[in-house]
Structures are given as C-alpha cells and as structure tokens.
Amino acid sequence: MKRAAAISLSALFVAALPSVAGAAEPLDTVQDIIERQIAAFLADDAATAYAFASPAIREKFATEDAFFDMVRKSYTPVYRAGNFAFGRSKIVGDMVVQEVLISGLDGKDWTALYQLLRQPDGSYRINGVHMVRTAPGPEI
C-alpha cells in the first residue's frame, strides 16, 4: 500500500530544486515529507522526524526527544505505521491538508489528517496531525 516512487531524470532535476518543486507540485512534495517522516519514526530517528515539524510545533516541543516522546505516546499509529496510503487532499492558500489511511500494527485502521504549511523559503513543514479511528469496512 505504500506509494512507489519512480526515479527519472526529471525527478532528479526537481529534487535538486526543492523550493521550486514545492511550489510547482505541493501534493507530491507534502506526500514525500509525510513518507519520510513516517520512515524516520519507524527507524527511531528523532532528528529526521523532528526536521519535518513546523516552527509552531518546534515551539511547543523544543527538543527532538520531547517531540518524539509526544508522538510515541499520542500518535502510535503514525509512530509505528503498518501499511499506509494517501487519500484525499486539499490546498487552501499556503496550507495543504493530506489524508493518510493507516493500518496500525495492532490491526486497527486510522485516518490521519496531516496539515502542512508552506514556509517563507517555499518548503513545507508538518503543522499538525488529527487522528480519526476508521470504522472497519465489510469483510472480504
């Protein structure tokens, strides 16, 4: 269920210019940020996970360890995501809301609504995540 990334010459060029890519393709950019942060949580890499947090989040959690502990305790499905897939998205000005459908390691399904804000340098940072327990679908 994880999004597969295709590498091409144009993708390598875009990667070299992240602020331009962020302005041109905000959905691809924010989905990449979310994937990278989830990967950092799975690897117990607090520094990388914290690097994707917005300045407002960094004000609330002044250290990598404080941020990591908060995510571990309050956002377990994100901290230890099983499979995940991107759902709907919405762009409102400098904000992108991205729905992420997550199967937790405990077998429960969640919807995480990520809010990312464009920063003055053109990059995007995660400004919050709202977790919603997803009702189970019909058995297959």
Image (tube, rainbow, N blue to C red):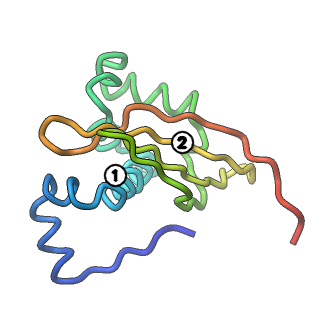
Give coordinates of residue 86: x percent, y percent. Answer: 52, 59
Q: Which one is closest to the eye, mark 1 or mark 2?
A: 2
Mark 1, residue position: 33
Left or right of residue 108, residue 73 in this image:
left
Looking at numbered disc 2 in the image, what kind of residue is underneath it? Leu
Q: Looking at the rendered structure, which numbered label has been put on residue 113?
A: 2
Give coordinates of residue 8: x percent, y percent. Answer: 22, 83
Q: Quadrant of the C terminus?
A: bottom right
Looking at numbered disc 1 in the image, what kind of residue is underneath it? Ile
Left or right of residue 130, residue 57 in this image:
left
Left or right of residue 18, residue 32 in this image:
right
Q: Callout 2 environment at 10 Å: few (<14), some (14 to 19), or many (20+)?
A: some
Q: In which quarter of the image is the N terminus?
A: bottom right
Q: Which residue appears at 40% of the width and 51% of the height?
A: 34
Who is closer to the viewer here, 75 or 46? 75
Q: Which residue appears at 21% of the width and 75% of the height?
A: 11
Please tell me in which quadrant of the rendered image residue 101 appears. bottom right
Q: Which residue appears at 28% of the width and 61% of the height?
A: 25
Left or right of residue 57, residue 9 in this image:
left
Q: Callout 1 environment at 10 Å: few (<14), some (14 to 19), or many (20+)?
A: many
User: Could you tell me how far apart the alpha carbons at marks 1 and 2 are, in whole angstroms?
Assistant: 14 Å
